[in-house]
Image (spheres, rainbow, N blue to C red):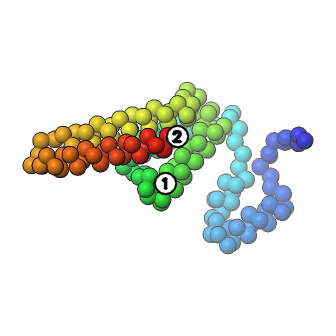
């Protein structure tokens, strides 16, 4: 069963307007947020400057998100439920952004999201591992027992990660 697709013109039906109005009253939606719900975007509607500014904003935001993902093990520990929820939210936002027509228009040379995430998470994990090894092998006023304990903790984490795969 295939339904016919239509292009949205930005006009909301009366029922949709009523629902939006109720959300505005009950959920503290501002007038500008209500107006944003009615906006449509056409690729030809952006000037060169607007497109450049939007590309810069997208790039800054995506780079910030990717920096957070590179610190995956530190910022989103697997044992912390709230951190995992935040990770899911971050990934959802990045995925939605990558799927937006305006994003693809302003940033046409972006790699696929899967490719980017794979590179970022791999590099972040390698950096984390190198940092852990450096911390363990640093000559400090630590006993051999402390070094052995730290090494066994690292091995335990790696084994636990391996079992998750």
Count of numbered marks: 2
Q: Position of residue 71 (x, y in %)?
A: 38, 44
Which residue corresponds to mark 2? 58
Q: Position of residue 129 (x, y in %)?
A: 32, 39
| Residue drawn 48% across the image and 44% down it | 164
Which residue corresponds to mark 1? 84
Extreme residue toward the bottom, this view: 26
| Element type where label 2 sits in the image | helix
| Element type where label 1 sits in the image | helix
| Residue drawn 44% across the image and 58% down it | 80
Q: Is residue 96 above or below residue 35?
A: above
In the picture, the quarter occupied by the N terminus is top right
Between 64 and 117, the residue placed more toward the observer is 117
Measured in 3D between alpha carbons, the distance from the residue under mark 1 to the one under mark 2, in whole angstroms, is 24 Å
The reply to whether residue 115 is in sight is: yes
Left or right of 80? Residue 88 is right
Q: Position of residue 23 (x, y in %)?
A: 70, 67
Extreme residue toward the left, this view: 141
**Which label sits in the foreground, 1 or 2?**
1
| Residue drawn 61% across the image and 44% down it | 96
Between 70 and 154, the residue placed more toward the observer is 154
Q: Position of residue 97 (x, y in %)?
A: 59, 42
């Amino acid at each position: 069963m295939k339904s016919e697709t239509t292009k949205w013109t930005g006009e909301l039906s009366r029922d949709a307007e009523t629902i939006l109005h109720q959300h505005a009253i009950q959920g503290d939606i501002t007038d500008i947020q209500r107006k944003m719900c009615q906006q449509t975007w056409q690729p030809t509607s952006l000037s060169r400057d607007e497109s450049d500014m939007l590309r810069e904003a997208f790039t800054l935001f995506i780079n910030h998100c990717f920096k957070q993902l590179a610190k995956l093990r530190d910022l989103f520990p697997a044992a912390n439920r709230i951190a995992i929820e935040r990770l899911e939210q971050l990934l959802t936002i990045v995925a939605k952004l990558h799927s937006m027509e305006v994003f693809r228009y302003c940033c046409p040379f972006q790699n696929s999201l899967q490719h980017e995430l794979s590179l970022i998470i791999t590099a972040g994990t390698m950096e984390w591992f190198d940092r852990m090894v450096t911390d363990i092998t640093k000559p400090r006023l630590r006993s051999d027992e402390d070094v052995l304990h730290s090494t066994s903790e690292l091995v335990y984490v790696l084994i636990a990660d391996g079992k998750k795969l």
